Amino acid sequence: MDFFQELWSWFYANRNEIATWVTIIGFIPAIEYFFKPFRRFWNYLKPPTKTESQISPEPPPAEYSSNPLFNVPIPKNPYFTARDQELKNIENSITQQPIALVGLGGVGKSHTAAHFAYLHEKKYQAVLWIFADTQQNLINNFGQLALQVSEWIDKLQLEVYDSSLLLNKIAFYLDTVKANYSQALPLYQRSLAILRAVFDENHPNVQTVKNNYERCLQAFEQNATD
């Protein structure tokens, strides 16, 4: 009983201070209720924090093919999905006929074509990408591709005879279509050098490339004097 009497005496003696603290403590829920909408708004603006288990790993860096005869301009996408049937259809048909992917802009035609190229790049000696959205882009891309292929001749591992004919065709395109005589002339010369190492000067192929070279040289000199 003495304990309870002493406790009561203490409460009674300090009743004013206790009343003040009870009032303050009782007011805390009211303050929290008042600021609750502001706290919700702040949490909405604040970027969400993720736990370690929720944090996704960093995506791998974009990769391009290491094949020098592969010029697809879109990097390999490790997260490419949802086109399995389209990829299978392309694989089943591409060896039998040309394939065209048709659809509205932005549905993923280019990325599907690029993904197929990456999946099957080892099946082909060369994978070449041409922009054909306009006629001018098509012409320009063929010209760029011709120059690239002329630089890749050694990497193509073609037979000597085939490489000389390919060089002649590239030079002929640059000469007659693009009127780019300065780039065509060294390709004609290289093609002639290859053919002359195999055939004599009177061989028809040697004569054809020689005639192309002389005509291109004449056009180049005439163009330089104009």
Image: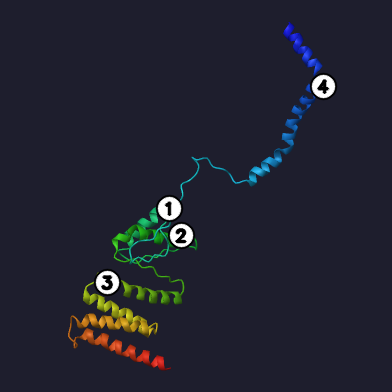
Of labels 2 and 1, earlier in sequence is 1
Asked which quadrant contains residue 204, the reply is bottom left
Residue positioned 28% across, 69% down in the render: 155
Type of amino acid at the residue the image marks with label 3: Asp
Type of amino acid at the residue the image marks with label 4: Asn
Asked which quadrant contains residue 66, the reply is bottom left
Of labels 4 and 1, earlier in sequence is 4
Of labels 4 and 3, earlier in sequence is 4
In front: label 3 or label 2: 3
Type of amino acid at the residue the image marks with label 2: Gly
> For mark 3, what is the residue?
154
Q: CA distance from mark 3 to mark 1?
A: 33 Å
Q: CA distance from mark 2 to mark 1?
A: 21 Å
- Up the image or down, 2 lies above or below 137; here it is above
Type of amino acid at the residue the image marks with label 1: Pro
Q: Which mark is residue 108?
A: 2
Task: Please state if 61 lies on the left or on the right of 188 as rendered.
Answer: right
Residue positioned 76% across, 10% down in the render: 6
Q: Which mark is residue 16?
A: 4
Instruction: State which quarter of the image contains the C terminus.
Output: bottom left
Q: Position of residue 151 (x, y in %)?
A: 32, 73
In front: label 4 or label 3: 4
Of labels 3 and 2, earlier in sequence is 2
> For mark 1, what is the residue?
60
Q: CA distance from mark 4 to mark 2?
A: 76 Å
Residue positioned 81% across, 15% down in the render: 12
Q: Position of residue 37 (x, y in %)?
A: 70, 40
Q: Nearer the viewer, residue 108 or 204?
A: 204
